[in-house]
Amino acid sequence: MRTLRTLVLSIATLAVALSVTGCKRPSAQAIVLTKDQEQQIAAAVLTAPPADLDQKLEVKFEDKLTLLGYKMEPKDKAAPGGSVSLSLFWRVDQPLPGDWKIFIHMEAPGLKRQPFDHYGVGGLYPLAQWKKGEIIKDTVTMEIPGDWPKSNTQLLIGVFDWGAWNKAQQNRRLKISNAPSGAAQAEDRLLLATIDIGGAAPAGAPAGGAGNAPAPQQKGPEYTVGQATEKPTIDGKLDDAVWASAKTVGTFKQPNGGASIPAMAADVKLAWDSENLYLAANVKDDDARNTHLKNDDTTWEGDVVELFLQGPGKEDYYELQWTPAGSTFDAHFVGHRSPAWEEAAKFQSNMTSKVVVDGDVNADGADKGWTVEAAIPWKSLGWDKAPEAGAKFMANLYRIDDKGTHDFQHMATWAPVGGDFHQLTGAGTLVLGNGSAPTRPAVMPNGRVLPLLPGAVQAVPAVKP
Protein backbone atom coordinates (compact mmCIF):
# COMPACT_ATOMS: atom_id res chain seq x y z
CA MET A 1 0.00 0.00 0.00
CA ARG A 2 1.21 3.48 -0.76
CA THR A 3 -0.29 5.90 1.76
CA LEU A 4 0.64 9.16 3.49
CA ARG A 5 3.51 11.26 2.21
CA THR A 6 6.13 9.93 -0.17
CA LEU A 7 9.81 10.62 0.13
CA VAL A 8 11.82 9.58 -2.90
CA LEU A 9 15.17 8.30 -1.72
CA SER A 10 17.92 8.22 -4.32
CA ILE A 11 19.12 4.71 -3.71
CA ALA A 12 20.96 3.32 -6.67
CA THR A 13 21.02 -0.25 -5.41
CA LEU A 14 19.46 -2.53 -2.89
CA ALA A 15 22.29 -4.90 -1.95
CA VAL A 16 24.78 -4.85 0.87
CA ALA A 17 28.33 -4.62 -0.45
CA LEU A 18 31.60 -6.26 0.42
CA SER A 19 31.01 -9.07 2.93
CA VAL A 20 27.33 -8.24 3.12
CA THR A 21 26.39 -8.72 -0.51
CA GLY A 22 23.35 -10.53 -1.72
CA CYS A 23 22.44 -10.41 -5.39
CA LYS A 24 23.18 -7.16 -7.15
CA ARG A 25 20.33 -4.73 -6.77
CA PRO A 26 21.01 -1.74 -8.94
CA SER A 27 17.76 0.18 -9.32
CA ALA A 28 16.39 3.20 -7.52
CA GLN A 29 13.29 2.85 -5.42
CA ALA A 30 10.75 5.18 -3.89
CA ILE A 31 10.13 4.69 -0.21
CA VAL A 32 6.79 5.62 1.24
CA LEU A 33 7.16 6.89 4.77
CA THR A 34 4.54 6.82 7.43
CA LYS A 35 4.17 9.79 9.73
CA ASP A 36 6.02 7.89 12.46
CA GLN A 37 8.93 7.24 10.10
CA GLU A 38 9.09 10.90 9.12
CA GLN A 39 9.19 11.77 12.82
CA GLN A 40 11.98 9.20 13.28
CA ILE A 41 14.06 11.01 10.66
CA ALA A 42 13.30 14.40 12.21
CA ALA A 43 14.41 13.11 15.62
CA ALA A 44 17.70 11.91 14.14
CA VAL A 45 18.64 15.35 12.77
CA LEU A 46 20.17 17.29 15.67
CA THR A 47 21.47 20.80 16.20
CA ALA A 48 24.37 19.53 18.33
CA PRO A 49 25.69 16.20 19.57
CA PRO A 50 24.71 15.20 23.14
CA ALA A 51 27.02 16.26 25.94
CA ASP A 52 27.26 12.73 27.39
CA LEU A 53 29.00 10.97 24.51
CA ASP A 54 30.91 7.84 25.50
CA GLN A 55 33.75 9.06 23.33
CA LYS A 56 34.17 12.47 21.72
CA LEU A 57 35.89 12.42 18.37
CA GLU A 58 36.60 14.72 15.47
CA VAL A 59 37.48 12.17 12.83
CA LYS A 60 37.12 13.37 9.26
CA PHE A 61 36.09 11.16 6.36
CA GLU A 62 37.62 13.18 3.53
CA ASP A 63 35.88 16.57 3.37
CA LYS A 64 32.41 15.01 3.45
CA LEU A 65 31.67 13.79 6.96
CA THR A 66 33.04 14.23 10.46
CA LEU A 67 32.38 11.62 13.14
CA LEU A 68 31.84 13.64 16.31
CA GLY A 69 31.57 10.69 18.66
CA TYR A 70 29.44 7.75 19.70
CA LYS A 71 27.34 6.19 22.46
CA MET A 72 27.17 2.45 23.00
CA GLU A 73 25.15 0.11 25.23
CA PRO A 74 26.45 -2.08 26.74
CA LYS A 75 29.77 -0.27 26.92
CA ASP A 76 32.26 -2.95 27.94
CA LYS A 77 30.86 -6.49 27.95
CA ALA A 78 28.25 -8.47 26.05
CA ALA A 79 27.27 -12.08 25.54
CA PRO A 80 26.86 -14.26 22.45
CA GLY A 81 23.24 -14.13 21.40
CA GLY A 82 22.87 -10.64 22.89
CA SER A 83 23.00 -7.29 21.16
CA VAL A 84 24.90 -4.02 21.14
CA SER A 85 23.25 -0.68 20.38
CA LEU A 86 25.62 1.82 18.77
CA SER A 87 24.72 5.45 18.05
CA LEU A 88 27.07 7.34 15.74
CA PHE A 89 26.94 11.13 15.57
CA TRP A 90 27.93 12.57 12.19
CA ARG A 91 28.36 16.14 10.99
CA VAL A 92 27.71 16.68 7.30
CA ASP A 93 30.49 18.89 5.92
CA GLN A 94 29.66 18.49 2.24
CA PRO A 95 26.87 16.72 0.34
CA LEU A 96 27.64 13.12 -0.58
CA PRO A 97 25.77 12.36 -3.81
CA GLY A 98 25.63 8.82 -5.06
CA ASP A 99 24.94 5.55 -3.32
CA TRP A 100 26.98 5.41 -0.11
CA LYS A 101 26.62 3.23 2.96
CA ILE A 102 28.05 3.15 6.45
CA PHE A 103 29.72 -0.14 7.30
CA ILE A 104 30.34 -1.56 10.76
CA HIS A 105 32.50 -4.65 11.19
CA MET A 106 32.10 -6.55 14.46
CA GLU A 107 35.35 -8.46 14.38
CA ALA A 108 37.15 -11.01 16.51
CA PRO A 109 40.54 -10.66 14.76
CA GLY A 110 41.53 -13.82 12.95
CA LEU A 111 38.38 -15.64 14.05
CA LYS A 112 35.15 -14.13 12.86
CA ARG A 113 33.61 -11.02 11.32
CA GLN A 114 29.96 -9.94 11.34
CA PRO A 115 29.12 -6.98 9.10
CA PHE A 116 26.38 -4.43 9.70
CA ASP A 117 26.28 -2.29 6.56
CA HIS A 118 23.40 0.13 6.20
CA TYR A 119 21.92 3.32 4.86
CA GLY A 120 21.37 6.05 7.47
CA VAL A 121 18.73 6.11 10.21
CA GLY A 122 17.48 2.57 9.85
CA GLY A 123 17.47 2.83 6.07
CA LEU A 124 15.01 5.74 6.09
CA TYR A 125 17.51 8.57 5.48
CA PRO A 126 20.40 7.53 3.18
CA LEU A 127 23.61 9.50 3.05
CA ALA A 128 22.79 11.01 -0.34
CA GLN A 129 19.93 12.88 1.34
CA TRP A 130 22.00 14.32 4.18
CA LYS A 131 22.30 18.10 4.01
CA LYS A 132 25.35 20.23 4.69
CA GLY A 133 25.49 21.35 8.32
CA GLU A 134 23.19 18.65 9.66
CA ILE A 135 24.23 16.54 12.63
CA ILE A 136 22.87 13.04 12.21
CA LYS A 137 22.29 10.48 14.94
CA ASP A 138 22.55 7.07 13.30
CA THR A 139 21.68 4.16 15.60
CA VAL A 140 22.29 0.51 14.74
CA THR A 141 21.36 -2.50 16.88
CA MET A 142 23.89 -5.26 16.26
CA GLU A 143 22.73 -8.79 17.06
CA ILE A 144 25.64 -10.94 18.25
CA PRO A 145 25.59 -14.45 16.73
CA GLY A 146 25.11 -17.19 19.29
CA ASP A 147 28.34 -18.90 18.23
CA TRP A 148 30.49 -15.79 18.61
CA PRO A 149 33.94 -16.73 20.00
CA LYS A 150 35.02 -15.44 23.39
CA SER A 151 37.17 -12.50 22.49
CA ASN A 152 37.98 -8.84 22.81
CA THR A 153 35.84 -7.92 19.83
CA GLN A 154 36.56 -4.82 17.78
CA LEU A 155 34.03 -2.47 16.23
CA LEU A 156 35.44 -0.93 13.06
CA ILE A 157 33.53 1.54 10.90
CA GLY A 158 33.82 3.37 7.60
CA VAL A 159 31.88 4.72 4.64
CA PHE A 160 31.89 3.00 1.24
CA ASP A 161 30.55 3.70 -2.23
CA TRP A 162 28.12 0.86 -2.88
CA GLY A 163 27.22 2.29 -6.27
CA ALA A 164 30.82 2.06 -7.50
CA TRP A 165 31.13 -1.48 -6.18
CA ASN A 166 27.89 -2.62 -7.77
CA LYS A 167 28.64 -1.17 -11.19
CA ALA A 168 32.35 -1.96 -11.57
CA GLN A 169 33.51 -3.72 -8.37
CA GLN A 170 35.46 -0.59 -7.42
CA ASN A 171 36.21 -0.73 -3.70
CA ARG A 172 36.02 2.96 -2.87
CA ARG A 173 35.86 4.16 0.73
CA LEU A 174 36.06 7.64 2.20
CA LYS A 175 39.59 8.15 3.47
CA ILE A 176 40.07 8.81 7.18
CA SER A 177 42.15 11.67 8.55
CA ASN A 178 43.09 12.98 12.01
CA ALA A 179 42.02 9.78 13.77
CA PRO A 180 43.33 9.03 17.29
CA SER A 181 46.65 7.20 17.38
CA GLY A 182 46.23 3.58 16.31
CA ALA A 183 42.55 4.01 15.44
CA ALA A 184 42.96 4.40 11.68
CA GLN A 185 43.26 0.85 10.38
CA ALA A 186 44.05 -0.50 6.94
CA GLU A 187 41.36 -0.33 4.24
CA ASP A 188 40.03 2.98 5.61
CA ARG A 189 38.47 1.45 8.69
CA LEU A 190 38.29 3.31 11.99
CA LEU A 191 38.73 1.25 15.16
CA LEU A 192 35.93 2.71 17.19
CA ALA A 193 35.78 0.54 20.31
CA THR A 194 36.60 -2.87 21.78
CA ILE A 195 34.07 -4.90 23.71
CA ASP A 196 34.53 -8.13 25.69
CA ILE A 197 32.11 -10.72 24.33
CA GLY A 198 31.60 -13.86 26.37
CA GLY A 199 34.63 -13.30 28.56
CA ALA A 200 37.87 -12.80 26.64
CA ALA A 201 40.15 -15.83 26.33
CA PRO A 202 43.35 -15.87 28.38
CA ALA A 203 46.39 -14.34 26.72
CA GLY A 204 48.02 -16.78 24.33
CA ALA A 205 45.00 -19.09 24.10
CA PRO A 206 42.60 -19.32 21.17
CA ALA A 207 39.49 -17.30 21.85
CA GLY A 208 36.18 -18.98 22.46
CA GLY A 209 36.96 -22.70 22.66
CA ALA A 210 37.50 -25.22 25.43
CA GLY A 211 41.17 -25.94 25.97
CA ASN A 212 43.07 -25.13 22.80
CA ALA A 213 40.20 -25.81 20.40
CA PRO A 214 38.55 -22.97 18.51
CA ALA A 215 34.90 -22.26 19.08
CA PRO A 216 32.69 -24.71 17.15
CA GLN A 217 30.89 -23.39 14.12
CA GLN A 218 27.12 -23.24 14.39
CA LYS A 219 25.47 -25.91 12.25
CA GLY A 220 22.76 -24.83 9.86
CA PRO A 221 19.22 -26.25 10.07
CA GLU A 222 18.30 -29.59 8.49
CA TYR A 223 15.07 -30.42 6.72
CA THR A 224 13.79 -33.78 5.54
CA VAL A 225 12.14 -33.42 2.15
CA GLY A 226 9.14 -35.72 2.04
CA GLN A 227 8.58 -38.01 -0.94
CA ALA A 228 5.43 -37.19 -2.88
CA THR A 229 3.20 -40.18 -3.59
CA GLU A 230 0.98 -38.01 -5.81
CA LYS A 231 2.25 -35.19 -7.97
CA PRO A 232 0.99 -31.76 -6.91
CA THR A 233 -0.90 -29.72 -9.46
CA ILE A 234 1.22 -26.65 -10.18
CA ASP A 235 -1.53 -24.06 -9.81
CA GLY A 236 -0.25 -21.94 -6.92
CA LYS A 237 -3.15 -22.91 -4.64
CA LEU A 238 -1.15 -25.28 -2.37
CA ASP A 239 -4.20 -27.46 -1.70
CA ASP A 240 -2.60 -30.76 -2.76
CA ALA A 241 -2.29 -33.69 -0.39
CA VAL A 242 1.50 -33.50 -0.43
CA TRP A 243 1.43 -29.99 1.06
CA ALA A 244 -1.14 -30.94 3.69
CA SER A 245 1.21 -33.64 4.98
CA ALA A 246 4.54 -31.83 4.54
CA LYS A 247 6.11 -29.93 7.38
CA THR A 248 7.43 -26.40 6.96
CA VAL A 249 11.17 -25.73 6.86
CA GLY A 250 10.77 -23.67 10.02
CA THR A 251 10.82 -20.07 11.19
CA PHE A 252 12.80 -17.63 9.07
CA LYS A 253 15.21 -15.13 10.63
CA GLN A 254 17.06 -12.06 9.45
CA PRO A 255 20.29 -12.86 7.53
CA ASN A 256 22.34 -11.69 10.52
CA GLY A 257 20.53 -14.11 12.82
CA GLY A 258 18.18 -11.57 14.39
CA ALA A 259 14.50 -12.24 14.81
CA SER A 260 12.42 -11.45 11.73
CA ILE A 261 9.51 -9.03 12.02
CA PRO A 262 5.96 -10.49 11.80
CA ALA A 263 5.37 -8.78 8.45
CA MET A 264 8.08 -11.04 6.99
CA ALA A 265 6.33 -14.29 7.92
CA ALA A 266 7.03 -16.99 5.35
CA ASP A 267 5.95 -20.60 5.15
CA VAL A 268 7.96 -22.85 2.80
CA LYS A 269 7.60 -26.58 2.16
CA LEU A 270 9.51 -28.93 -0.15
CA ALA A 271 8.80 -32.36 -1.61
CA TRP A 272 10.32 -34.67 -4.22
CA ASP A 273 9.63 -37.59 -6.51
CA SER A 274 11.41 -39.41 -9.30
CA GLU A 275 11.09 -36.45 -11.68
CA ASN A 276 11.07 -33.19 -9.73
CA LEU A 277 11.94 -31.24 -6.65
CA TYR A 278 8.81 -29.34 -5.58
CA LEU A 279 8.51 -26.07 -3.69
CA ALA A 280 5.49 -24.40 -2.09
CA ALA A 281 5.80 -20.99 -0.45
CA ASN A 282 3.29 -18.71 1.18
CA VAL A 283 4.38 -15.24 2.28
CA LYS A 284 2.62 -12.38 3.99
CA ASP A 285 2.83 -9.18 1.96
CA ASP A 286 0.70 -6.06 2.39
CA ASP A 287 2.05 -4.59 -0.87
CA ALA A 288 3.05 -7.21 -3.44
CA ARG A 289 5.39 -5.59 -5.96
CA ASN A 290 7.91 -6.60 -8.57
CA THR A 291 8.11 -4.64 -11.81
CA HIS A 292 10.53 -7.05 -13.52
CA LEU A 293 8.16 -9.03 -15.68
CA LYS A 294 10.74 -10.79 -17.87
CA ASN A 295 12.42 -13.99 -16.78
CA ASP A 296 16.10 -13.80 -15.85
CA ASP A 297 15.89 -10.06 -15.33
CA THR A 298 17.03 -8.44 -12.07
CA THR A 299 14.03 -9.90 -10.28
CA TRP A 300 15.71 -9.47 -6.88
CA GLU A 301 14.94 -5.75 -7.12
CA GLY A 302 11.39 -6.45 -5.93
CA ASP A 303 9.49 -8.87 -3.71
CA VAL A 304 10.89 -12.34 -4.27
CA VAL A 305 11.37 -15.86 -2.90
CA GLU A 306 14.79 -17.42 -3.55
CA LEU A 307 16.20 -20.94 -3.36
CA PHE A 308 19.93 -21.76 -3.46
CA LEU A 309 20.78 -25.43 -4.02
CA GLN A 310 24.09 -27.32 -4.16
CA GLY A 311 24.34 -31.04 -4.85
CA PRO A 312 26.25 -33.54 -2.68
CA GLY A 313 30.00 -33.09 -2.99
CA LYS A 314 29.67 -30.42 -5.67
CA GLU A 315 31.07 -26.91 -5.94
CA ASP A 316 28.57 -25.67 -8.49
CA TYR A 317 25.14 -24.52 -7.34
CA TYR A 318 21.83 -23.15 -8.58
CA GLU A 319 19.90 -20.00 -7.75
CA LEU A 320 16.14 -19.96 -8.41
CA GLN A 321 13.75 -17.06 -7.80
CA TRP A 322 10.02 -16.43 -8.03
CA THR A 323 8.19 -13.10 -7.90
CA PRO A 324 4.53 -12.18 -7.23
CA ALA A 325 4.39 -10.97 -10.84
CA GLY A 326 5.01 -14.54 -12.03
CA SER A 327 8.48 -13.87 -13.44
CA THR A 328 11.36 -16.16 -12.52
CA PHE A 329 15.14 -16.21 -12.39
CA ASP A 330 17.28 -19.32 -12.71
CA ALA A 331 21.06 -19.41 -12.81
CA HIS A 332 23.87 -21.97 -12.59
CA PHE A 333 27.12 -20.93 -10.90
CA VAL A 334 30.22 -23.13 -11.22
CA GLY A 335 31.83 -21.48 -8.17
CA HIS A 336 31.07 -18.77 -5.65
CA ARG A 337 29.43 -16.01 -7.74
CA SER A 338 31.22 -17.33 -10.82
CA PRO A 339 30.53 -16.64 -13.62
CA ALA A 340 28.84 -13.22 -13.50
CA TRP A 341 25.11 -13.55 -13.00
CA GLU A 342 24.33 -12.44 -16.57
CA GLU A 343 26.26 -15.45 -17.87
CA ALA A 344 25.01 -17.80 -15.15
CA ALA A 345 21.41 -16.88 -15.99
CA LYS A 346 21.73 -18.36 -19.49
CA PHE A 347 21.02 -21.66 -17.73
CA GLN A 348 17.48 -22.97 -18.15
CA SER A 349 15.98 -25.01 -15.32
CA ASN A 350 12.86 -25.90 -17.33
CA MET A 351 10.93 -25.53 -14.11
CA THR A 352 7.19 -24.97 -14.08
CA SER A 353 5.77 -22.46 -11.63
CA LYS A 354 2.64 -20.54 -10.86
CA VAL A 355 1.79 -17.74 -8.45
CA VAL A 356 -1.47 -16.74 -6.81
CA VAL A 357 -1.73 -13.31 -5.22
CA ASP A 358 -4.25 -12.30 -2.58
CA GLY A 359 -4.45 -8.72 -3.83
CA ASP A 360 -3.11 -6.77 -6.80
CA VAL A 361 0.51 -6.92 -7.98
CA ASN A 362 2.20 -3.55 -8.58
CA ALA A 363 -0.91 -1.60 -7.65
CA ASP A 364 -2.06 0.26 -4.58
CA GLY A 365 -4.34 -1.84 -2.46
CA ALA A 366 -4.71 -3.86 0.68
CA ASP A 367 -2.74 -6.95 -0.33
CA LYS A 368 -2.51 -9.90 2.06
CA GLY A 369 0.13 -12.14 0.53
CA TRP A 370 1.03 -14.48 -2.28
CA THR A 371 1.86 -18.12 -2.88
CA VAL A 372 4.18 -19.81 -5.33
CA GLU A 373 4.26 -23.45 -6.40
CA ALA A 374 7.07 -24.87 -8.52
CA ALA A 375 8.31 -28.14 -10.01
CA ILE A 376 12.05 -28.27 -10.78
CA PRO A 377 13.19 -31.23 -12.94
CA TRP A 378 16.11 -33.23 -11.59
CA LYS A 379 17.46 -33.55 -15.13
CA SER A 380 17.92 -29.79 -15.31
CA LEU A 381 19.94 -29.93 -12.10
CA GLY A 382 22.45 -32.36 -13.58
CA TRP A 383 20.85 -35.65 -12.53
CA ASP A 384 19.98 -38.27 -15.13
CA LYS A 385 17.49 -39.62 -12.65
CA ALA A 386 16.36 -38.57 -9.19
CA PRO A 387 18.96 -38.87 -6.44
CA GLU A 388 18.51 -41.70 -3.97
CA ALA A 389 16.65 -41.23 -0.72
CA GLY A 390 19.08 -40.01 1.91
CA ALA A 391 20.96 -37.71 -0.49
CA LYS A 392 21.93 -34.43 1.17
CA PHE A 393 22.00 -30.99 -0.46
CA MET A 394 23.35 -27.71 0.85
CA ALA A 395 20.58 -25.16 0.49
CA ASN A 396 19.18 -21.87 1.63
CA LEU A 397 15.89 -20.04 1.23
CA TYR A 398 15.31 -16.30 1.25
CA ARG A 399 12.30 -14.04 1.20
CA ILE A 400 12.77 -10.35 0.40
CA ASP A 401 10.06 -7.75 0.97
CA ASP A 402 11.52 -4.89 -1.04
CA LYS A 403 11.08 -1.58 0.77
CA GLY A 404 13.93 0.16 -1.05
CA THR A 405 16.33 0.14 1.90
CA HIS A 406 17.93 -3.31 1.71
CA ASP A 407 18.11 -3.54 5.47
CA PHE A 408 18.06 -6.93 7.15
CA GLN A 409 14.68 -6.17 8.69
CA HIS A 410 13.05 -6.63 5.29
CA MET A 411 14.86 -9.86 4.47
CA ALA A 412 14.24 -13.28 5.92
CA THR A 413 16.18 -16.51 5.52
CA TRP A 414 15.97 -20.12 6.58
CA ALA A 415 19.67 -20.38 7.50
CA PRO A 416 21.31 -17.09 8.59
CA VAL A 417 24.81 -16.92 7.09
CA GLY A 418 25.20 -13.14 6.87
CA GLY A 419 24.45 -10.88 3.95
CA ASP A 420 26.11 -12.93 1.19
CA PHE A 421 23.19 -14.95 -0.15
CA HIS A 422 25.58 -17.10 -2.19
CA GLN A 423 27.37 -18.30 0.96
CA LEU A 424 26.39 -21.97 1.29
CA THR A 425 29.04 -23.06 3.78
CA GLY A 426 27.17 -23.29 7.07
CA ALA A 427 23.80 -22.94 5.35
CA GLY A 428 20.99 -25.48 5.70
CA THR A 429 20.85 -29.12 4.64
CA LEU A 430 18.06 -30.79 2.67
CA VAL A 431 17.80 -34.56 3.13
CA LEU A 432 15.69 -36.51 0.65
CA GLY A 433 13.38 -38.61 2.79
CA ASN A 434 12.00 -42.06 2.10
CA GLY A 435 8.26 -41.58 2.39
CA SER A 436 6.18 -38.51 3.13
CA ALA A 437 7.18 -36.03 5.79
CA PRO A 438 5.43 -36.04 9.19
CA THR A 439 1.93 -34.67 8.98
CA ARG A 440 1.20 -31.25 10.43
CA PRO A 441 -1.91 -29.12 10.12
CA ALA A 442 -1.61 -27.01 7.00
CA VAL A 443 -1.78 -23.71 8.86
CA MET A 444 0.04 -20.79 7.28
CA PRO A 445 1.65 -17.80 9.04
CA ASN A 446 -1.52 -15.76 8.64
CA GLY A 447 -3.42 -18.37 10.64
CA ARG A 448 -5.54 -19.62 7.76
CA VAL A 449 -5.89 -23.28 6.79
CA LEU A 450 -5.35 -24.45 3.22
CA PRO A 451 -6.66 -23.65 0.70
CA LEU A 452 -4.98 -20.37 1.51
CA LEU A 453 -6.61 -17.82 -0.69
CA PRO A 454 -10.40 -18.06 -0.79
CA GLY A 455 -12.44 -15.40 -2.48
CA ALA A 456 -11.07 -12.90 -4.96
CA VAL A 457 -7.53 -13.78 -6.00
CA GLN A 458 -5.31 -12.90 -8.89
CA ALA A 459 -3.81 -15.89 -10.67
CA VAL A 460 -0.53 -15.36 -12.51
CA PRO A 461 -0.02 -17.70 -15.50
CA ALA A 462 2.43 -20.56 -15.17
CA VAL A 463 5.96 -19.66 -16.22
CA LYS A 464 8.19 -22.04 -18.17
CA PRO A 465 11.54 -20.29 -18.71
Image (spheres, helix red, strand yellow):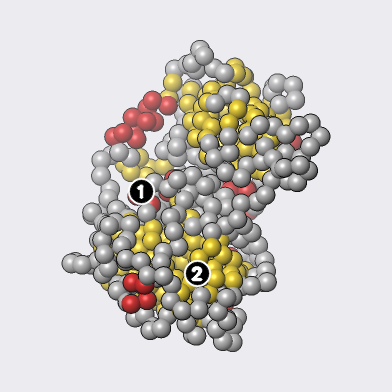
Q: Is mark 1 on a helix, strand or loop?
A: helix
Q: Considering only vertical position in the picture, is 286 above or below 297?
A: above
The foreground one among 195 and 55 is: 195
Q: Which amino acid does label 1 sit on?
A: Pro
Q: What residue type is labelled 2?
A: Thr
Report the disc number at residue 262: 1
Report the disc number at residue 224: 2
| Residue 174 in picture, x, y percent from top left | 64, 35
Judge the density around disc 1: few (<14), some (14-19), many (≥20) Cα neighbours within 10 Å: few
Judge the density around disc 2: few (<14), some (14-19), many (≥20) Cα neighbours within 10 Å: many
- Horizontally, residue 227 falls left or right of residue 175, namely left
Q: Residue furthest right?
A: 204
Q: Considering only vertical position in the picture, is 364 above or below 60?
A: below
Mark 1 or 2: the one toward you: 2
Residue occupying the point 70% across, 21% down:
180
Residue occupying the point 64% across, 23% down:
59
| Residue 366 in picture, x, y percent from top left | 23, 54
